[in-house]
Image (cartoon, rainbow, N blue to C red):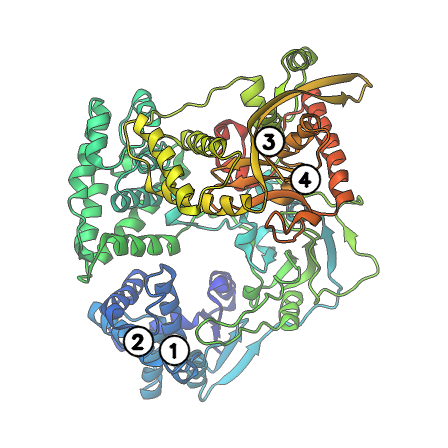
Amino acid sequence: MKVLQIVPPKFFQELRWQAVYSQGRLQPLTIQGLASRILKERGVVYREDWVLETVAVWEAVEQLLPDLEYFAPIAHYPGFVDEVRWLLHQVDYGELKLDELPSAARPEVEKLHRAYHARLEAYGVLDGPGQLRRALISLQDTPPAFLQGFQQVELVGLPELTPLEGEFIRELTRGRVLRLAQPEPGEGEPSITAALDPAAEIEEIAKAVRRQLEDGLSPRQIGVAFPEPRNYASLLLPIFGKYGIPWNMPGQSLADLPLGRAVSAFLTGEIAGWHKSHLQLLTAPGWGLPFSLTEEERRALRLAPPLEGLPAWVEYLGSFPGWEGALTLVRQVSQGFPAQPLAAHARSLQKLLGHFPPERWQVGDLLAKAELLKSWDALQLILDDLKLAETVVSLERFALLVRSIMQNYGVNPPRTLADRIAVLPISELGAARLKALHVGGLVQGDFPRNSRRHWLTRLKASEDAHAMYKLILSAGEDVFLYYPQTDHEGKLNLPSTVIPRVDEERRASGGDRLPIWRPQPEFTSLADPKVVEEIRARILAEGLSVSQLNRYARCPYHFFCAFVLKLDPLEEESLEPTALDEGRIVHSVLQKFWENHSEGPLPTISQGQGEVEGLLQEHYAELGMPAPPRLLRMLRRFIRYDLGLASQGWRPTFLERRFRGLMIPVVLADGSEYQVELRGVIDRIDLAPDGSYVLYDYKTGSAPTATEVRLGKDVQIAAYLLAAQELLPAAENVGVGYYLTTTAKRVGIFQEDWTEPLLLRRGDNCLAKEDFLAQLGFFQETISSLLGGIFAGKFPAEPSSSQVCSYCPYQGISRREVGIG
């Protein structure tokens, strides 16, 4: 008896390979593949093109954009088109009925639906549900000849069918035997391993898989699954590589490959007006377009001032031959990007890429060359499709469309004849028949997923956790379950509720404290005791400024580069004041203002605003330029709030108060003791009528959080607090904080009894008097401990938060990625 097997796409190749040994009895096909074959036999002419489907949705949205009312507030956001595409497919597959939508949204969805299908028809494209519906009509009319020899239809491991797919299968099985081929769970109990964190979890899986390969199992007999494999991709690549495990590495998004990034950089530069960063991205070695630039020419851009616009860059860099050619080419192409049809935009972009054929790109090896050629072919295919579209759009909308297509276009790694281990989502395990299955990531919130109601339909996706668990047990003869006890940030995970409780759960490693996983840099401390001794001697002789010590608290490696190695970051030339210059100017303006009003009646708000405006304009007049409007607005807002605070009796009395001689004891592990002198400048000390005082340090940019201050991850104002005990020994300190000039917010610690006089909201940073005094002792210990780390030669690249890395000038040598904190 001939059997037609309907199988999931993920397992089609595997089941087709197995069908070879059935002597023609089994014929596996996917639902979509079966529909295509029916249409082919019927002679239906159509085009299957995912890119044009995406373009059709974009064109439908662009066409109806002026008439949208319900969707008007969100229609211009990049993700709106993807939402519309999902919505239209839900309707076409029968999973969503129009009457389930809000009444105000229904007519607009109907119009979008009609416009989308009109564009598909114009392109001769049938999307997935369109092919199924046409094939269903053919089945209802006359069954295709190739189906007449099949007496049985077998559904092998299919996920839940959509209504349209269900109708198609019912018509297909009319007059035939229908069989559901769903494996039953094995009799053995699964193994359960609790790992410390995701990295340890992947390490355990890799070790187990390596042992099974060495014991004789082939890669195709082993599977690895996660609720969402892409969340583990950054760990799988290095760890599986370390153990030499062959696996089906995921394809990369075209947008993340060098060619895609170069195209994005060009479009961004065209839209934003060609700032320095755009040229750096466009010409970056390995990630930008392969312009022929010398190292000297690249250095000229690094040191260039922050100009804007191609004419300015031509004037500044045009004397360099490489830059002259590069900028001339960019200017020629950039003239072809007004509001115009999509086809014209695509031709202009192809014109640019025509100057950079694959042979011009410098690639390191054969695999990189293959990846480049695949990227090139993919991008040319996309642009060729876009040349069929005549909808007129702006460059901004064209760029959004191209980025969206590139982001969703996967470039698969080179194929190989060798067997590989399948790494796949748990939801796709339906047709798996594995000797060994390893399933990780089984924590609450991920398995089953936390479901939310859709923003438009208000429908809530459901996931039957116990059915999914049964699917896992059915997919392998031996099943191994894993879960990480903490996530990559060190937060506690709970095992999924479907994992059975067992008396003895294997733990990957012991220990009372669960460490936070993070990439470890190679350099952590100095090994040469002579160098360490030289650093000690220098600090004992010169002392340290508070800002230098705080640099160590924020990131020891930053301190090492700046203080020990004395590395000067390359600074770009600037035609305008830098952020540092602006900060100094604002400090000077506020210092002068309060020097004028340290005594006597306070000015009115309008008088104060006029005065700070005048002081700011004086500073900028000396530079030969007008004061920036944003700084004028900022100071007007700030002085309004500051005068309100002063009206409560807090008068800024000590301004830019310098101190030195703050001695901090340091005791090292070998018992040796030292005294280190700290020096610094306190921006401002406000006195109350009773003699109490508050310390402030102005911040014109971002500031640490109150929690970071309390925990000693930032010690600048902590050191000021200790210094003030000697500057004003008879007065009571009731608070210390960073004073943000952008928002007038104060970040620090304050005595809770003084929150109302200080116009503060009571929060975690408002402490009882005894806790406030205890915090002083903690600050002393923290600063002493930091100095001990310096004296011991410890300089690991361990920033106190990921934000520290975002403005670090030593990123290139710290071996850290921005965002890993």
Instruction: Kindly identify the amino acid type of the residue bearing the numbered disc 1.
Output: Val
**Secondary structure of the residue carrying numbered label 2:** helix
Rendered position, 583 above or below 10: above
Residue with the most extreme front position: 600
**Secondary structure of the residue carrying numbered label 1:** helix
The earlier-in-sequence mark between 3 and 1 is 1
- In the rendered image, which quarter is residue 519 located in? top right
The earlier-in-sequence mark between 3 and 4 is 3
- In the rendered image, which quarter is residue 557 located in? top right
The earlier-in-sequence mark between 2 and 1 is 1
What residue sits right under mark 3 in the picture? 555
Q: CA distance from mark 2 to mark 1?
A: 9 Å
Q: Residue at x 31, y 63 (%)?
A: 54
Horizontal arrangement in the rendering, residue 143 relative to residue 463 (left or right): left
Circle 2 packing at 10 Å, graded few (<14), some (14-19), many (20+), is: many
Circle 4 packing at 10 Å, graded few (<14), some (14-19), many (20+), is: few
The earlier-in-sequence mark between 1 and 4 is 1
Where residue 171 is drawn, which disc sits there?
none
Circle 3 packing at 10 Å, graded few (<14), some (14-19), many (20+), is: many
**Residue closer to the observer: 205 or 768:** 768
Instruction: Kindly identify the amino acid type of the residue bearing the numbered disc 2.
Output: His
Rendered position, 466 above or below 50: below
Task: Identify the image quadrant of the C terminus.
Answer: top right
What residue sits right under mark 2 in the picture? 113
Q: Position of residue 134 (x, y in %)?
A: 31, 79
Q: Nearer the viewer, mark 3 or mark 1?
A: 3
Q: CA distance from mark 1 to mark 4?
A: 72 Å
The earlier-in-sequence mark between 2 and 3 is 2
| Residue 215, visible in the rendered structure | no
What residue sits right under mark 4 in the picture? 690
Q: Position of residue 444 (x, y in %)?
A: 66, 62
Q: Residue at x 34, y 74 (%)?
A: 70
